[in-house]
Amino acid sequence: MNQKFTLILAAGITAFVLVVGGAMINRAAVQSEPAATLTPDFAEIQDMYAQREAEIQDLYTQREAEYQSRIAEANAALAAAFAQQEDEPPSSTPTQSAVEPVPATISPQDAMLVAATLAPRAKILSRPELVNYEGTVAYEVTLDTGLVYVDANTGAVLYNGTTQPQKSVQRGSFHEDEEHEEEHEHERGEDHDD
């Protein structure tokens, strides 16, 4: 029985070693496979890099083409605006445009008085209108001798386009001038009586 027992024991140990050894080999094989699939080949890395580089180059080319077309459109619009500006005849009067009614400090009558002092013999052809004169709200007073622009807030003359020579405005009232003339006439009358 000894011999039979030894043989069975040897067979059991051999079977145990084979099972354990097979399991270890199987485990080593399973662990080595994922490592091989996780690391791509160097050629695959180069291909992926080349694809990305081509995609980036395509995007850059598309954006550059779009940018150049926008620049061309803007240049064409500028050229058209410049050509239109050159085709328009130059105006002899300063730039003005009608403005919405805004509160003005001086009245249209005051603007007419200021214009009348610049050209006393001129006739006012129409009621003064509020306009934008070079960024300032002004009255445009149309006289038969030209245009006068009066600041609607200060009453200052912004532009005098009258053709008459300007005369200085004397200060004083109309009644004071009449009194001086009467005194001079009275003195002259006394001289003639003597």
Image: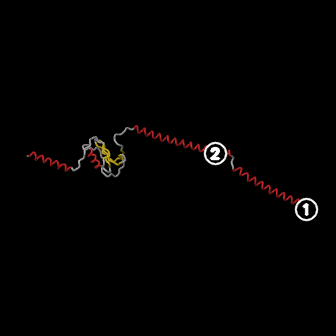
Residue visible at 37% across and 39% down?
A: 90
Is the Cβ of the residue at disc 1 closer than 8 Å to that at disc 2? no
Q: Nearer the viewer, residue 87 or 184?
A: 184
16 lies above or below 80: below
Residue topped by disc 1: 2
Residue visible at 34% across and 40% down?
A: 92
Residue 158 at x, y percent in the picture: 32, 46
Q: Is residue 153 left or right of residue 175?
A: right
Residue topped by disc 2: 49
Question: Can you say which quadrant of the picture contains the N terminus?
Answer: bottom right
**Disc assigned to residue 17:** none
Q: In this view, does 173 lie to the left or right of 149?
A: left
Residue 146 at x, y percent in the picture: 30, 42
Residue visible at 75% across and 54% down?
A: 28
Residue type of the residue flagged with mark 2: Tyr
Disc 1 from disc 2: Cα separation? 71 Å
- Few, some or many residues within 10 Å of mark 2 (<14, 14–19, 20+): few
**Residue located farthest toward the front when viewing the structure as drawn:** 42
105 lies above or below 64: below
Residue 2 at x, y percent in the picture: 91, 62
Q: Label 2: state its secondary structure.
A: helix
Residue type of the residue flagged with mark 1: Asn
